Image (cartoon, rainbow, N blue to C red):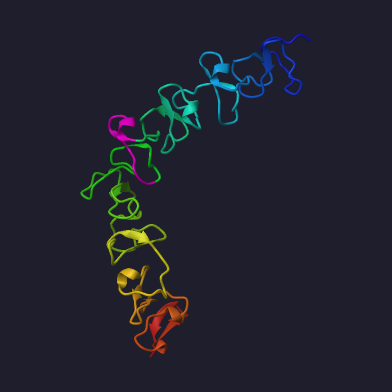
Amino acid sequence: MVITAGGACDPLSGVCPSGMECVTAGPNANACEVRGTIGTKCGSTTDCKNGLVCANSGAQAGTCVELNGAEELCSSNNDCSNGLACAKVGPKAGTCEQSGTEGTLCSSDTDCISGSVCAVAGLNSGTCQLKGGPGTSCNWGGGCTGGLVCALAGAYAGSCEQKGTEGTHCDSNNPCDAGFVCATAGANTGTCVPSQTTIGNSCSGASDCQGPNIICGPQNTCCVSTGGACQATSECCYKSDPGEVMCDTTDNTCSIIG
């Protein structure tokens, strides 16, 4: 049987007319196609016909493919047509979008379109974001949008972040994310900081101890104050005699005996 271009073929035997090959991937899979056309094997883009490129990632890696247009799926910038880039974060993540728009990669503000800047911190770092958006630069006076606040301390200091993120302002533990507490002493006072288990550590002041109801006790060790949550009596603060206090098993809080 004579197989012509577009005719069905057996990928295992690969029998096709001279100058053609049996395509194994893409829309023309299991058909004989002219080398350099969609789905045929390639080592570089020079092996592909005009308008096609050699995919270097994904399910069709090593074959000639069409560049994706706006809003089409992508895994890297190589999948997108000229002038488009693969958005890495945000609502358009994983689709080809205009270079410089929200979620596309950047190294400076000049890589982003007017009204957007290159995020400098957080999960969106190194991507274009609207001014005042997540990870974009801000000052203590504001400059953030969409309910974001300017982080005052920590790794994200000077960038717009969700309230409760490390370094954002707080008056109590309530606004801080899980695993964080509102610092009551030290350089980061009034901001959300990582909660650390410091019970039993040596201390010289409150700033050395971290966590809800954990203070620097009379013995210069971090301990749980009266009423604070505990797991053992040894965690509870006492004035001079360890027998003064106990970890009440009825509510697991430190209590004064007597």
Q: Is residue 159 visible?
A: yes
Examine the rendered structure and indicate whether residue 119 appears above or below residue 250: above
Horizontal side, residue 197 vs residue 173: left or right? right
Q: In the displayed image of the protein, which residue is found farthest to the right?
A: 1
Instruction: Please identify the quadrant where the N terminus is shown.
Output: top right
Q: How far across and how far down the image is residue 226, in percent?
A: 36, 79
Examine the rendered structure and indicate whether residue 81 appears above or below residue 7: below
Examine the rendered structure and indicate whether residue 166 appears above or below residue 37: below
Query: Magenta residues: mostly which secondary structure?
Result: loop
For the record, the magenta segment spans 108-122
Q: In this orientation, which residue lies closer to the viewer: 74 or 217?
A: 217
Name the residue located 67 percent from the left edge and 23 percent from the top edge: 24
Q: How far across and how far down the image is residue 132, in percent?
A: 28, 41
Q: Give the total of numbered labels.
A: 0
Q: How far across and how far down the image is residue 142, in percent?
A: 23, 47
Q: In the displayed image of the protein, which residue is found farthest to the bottom?
A: 258
The answer to which quarter of the image holds residue 181 is: bottom left
Horizontal side, residue 8 vs residue 112: left or right? right
Name the residue located 36 percent from the left edge and 30 percent from the top edge: 100
Instruction: Please identify the quadrant where the C terminus is shown.
Output: bottom left
Assess whether residue 252 is covered by the magenta stretch. no
Assess whether residue 112 is covered by the magenta stretch. yes
Examine the rendered structure and indicate whether residue 181 appears above or below residue 150: below
Name the residue located 34 percent from the left edge and 70 percent from the top edge: 208
Q: In the displayed image of the protein, which residue is found farthest to the left?
A: 141
The answer to which quarter of the image holds residue 8 is: top right
Q: In this orientation, which residue lies closer to the viewer: 255 or 150?
A: 150
Name the residue located 72 percent from the left edge and 22 percent from the top edge: 11
